[in-house]
């Protein structure tokens, strides 16, 4: 008799813990759904006063930009390369600048670069937006901005380490005369150009 009662208690406890975990999943889904609604409502042009937090989207030619965004630019040289930035809080604010202006723009503004692959640029942008809005709701705007920018600083620091390691390997290859000076310089410029 005691064994049956013990079995029943264990079964009941197990069912309660399953129910509790299902509640957590449901709440997580609800929170995610609500957050998506907020981003879709306010992040698509309703937020006029933003925190000037820009997301580097990609570098493309003017003709590619016009095809992707279905907007026409006044520039006459359609092969000229430009950088595209999206406001993290207002997806309707798109900034297109020439590559020559990129460094000056990024030093004056808060910019998140993310990974450099074009294929997942849209996913990166929306994932970063989701994380930012989530932090804004739970922690406040100041902490959200600091967190997002801190993550970007950490990513840039890691990229710098990787670049330095590649340059060191290139130096070793040149030292042992495995490549010419011209090949070395081309490879070095390629490594340095990646952010």
Image (cartoon, rainbow, N blue to C red):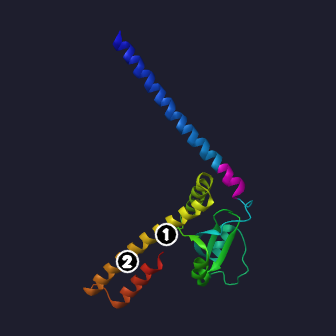
- Visible in this render: residue 5? yes
| Residue at screen point 58% across, 77% down | 106
| Residue at screen point 47% across, 76% down | 194
- Visible in this render: residue 120? no
The percent position of residue 134, horizontal first and vertical second, equals 59, 53
- Relative to residue 5, is residue 135 depicted above or below? below
Residue position for label 2: 164
Q: Is mark 1 on a helix, strand or loop?
A: helix
Going from the N terminus, do you reach mark 1 or mark 2 first?
Answer: 1
**Does 131 lie within the magenta span?**
no
| Residue at screen point 62% across, 52% down | 137
Residue position for label 1: 153
The percent position of residue 20, horizontal first and vertical second, equals 51, 32
Q: Nearer the viewer, residue 18 or 184?
A: 18
164 sits to left or right of 155: left
Residue 165 appears in which quarter of the rendering?
bottom left
Toward the bottom, the furthest residue is: 181
Toward the left, the furthest residue is: 176
36 sits to left or right of 24: right
157 sits to left or right of 94: left
- Relative to residue 48, is residue 36 depicted above or below? above
| Residue at screen point 63% across, 49% down | 35
**Does 42 lie within the magenta span?**
yes
Q: Which of 87 and 154 is in front in this view?
A: 154
Q: How far apart are marks 1 and 2 (CA)?
A: 16 Å
The percent position of residue 173, horizontal first and vertical second, equals 29, 82
Few, some or many C-alpha atoms within 10 Å of disc 1 (few <14, some 14-19, many ≥20)? some
Q: What stretch is highlighted in magenta?
A: 36-43
Q: Is mark 2 on a helix, strand or loop?
A: helix
- Evaluate if marks 1 and 2 touch, with contact meaning CB atoms under 8 Å apart: no
Residue 133: which numbered mark, if any? Answer: none
């Amino acid at each position: 008799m005691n064994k049956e009662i013990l079995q029943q208690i264990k079964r009941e406890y197990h069912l309660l813990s399953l129910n509790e975990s299902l509640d957590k999943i449901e709440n997580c889904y609800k929170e995610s759904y609500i957050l998506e609604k907020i981003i879709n409502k306010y992040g698509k042009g309703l937020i006029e006063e933003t925190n000037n937090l820009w997301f580097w989207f990609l570098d493309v030619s003017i003709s590619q930009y016009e095809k992707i965004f279905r907007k026409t630019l006044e520039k006459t040289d359609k092969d000229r390369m430009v950088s595209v930035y999206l406001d993290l809080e207002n997806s309707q604010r798109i900034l297109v600048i020439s590559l020559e202006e990129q460094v000056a723009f990024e030093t004056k503004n808060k910019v998140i670069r993310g990974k450099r692959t074009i294929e997942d640029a849209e996913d990166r942008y929306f994932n970063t937006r989701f994380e930012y809005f989530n932090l804004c709701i739970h922690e406040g705007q100041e902490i959200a901005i600091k967190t997002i920018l801190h993550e970007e600083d950490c990513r840039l620091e890691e990229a710098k380490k990787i670049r330095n390691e590649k340059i060191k390997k290139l130096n070793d290859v040149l030292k042992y005369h495995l490549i010419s000076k011209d090949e070395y310089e081309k490879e070095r410029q390629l490594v340095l150009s990646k952010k």
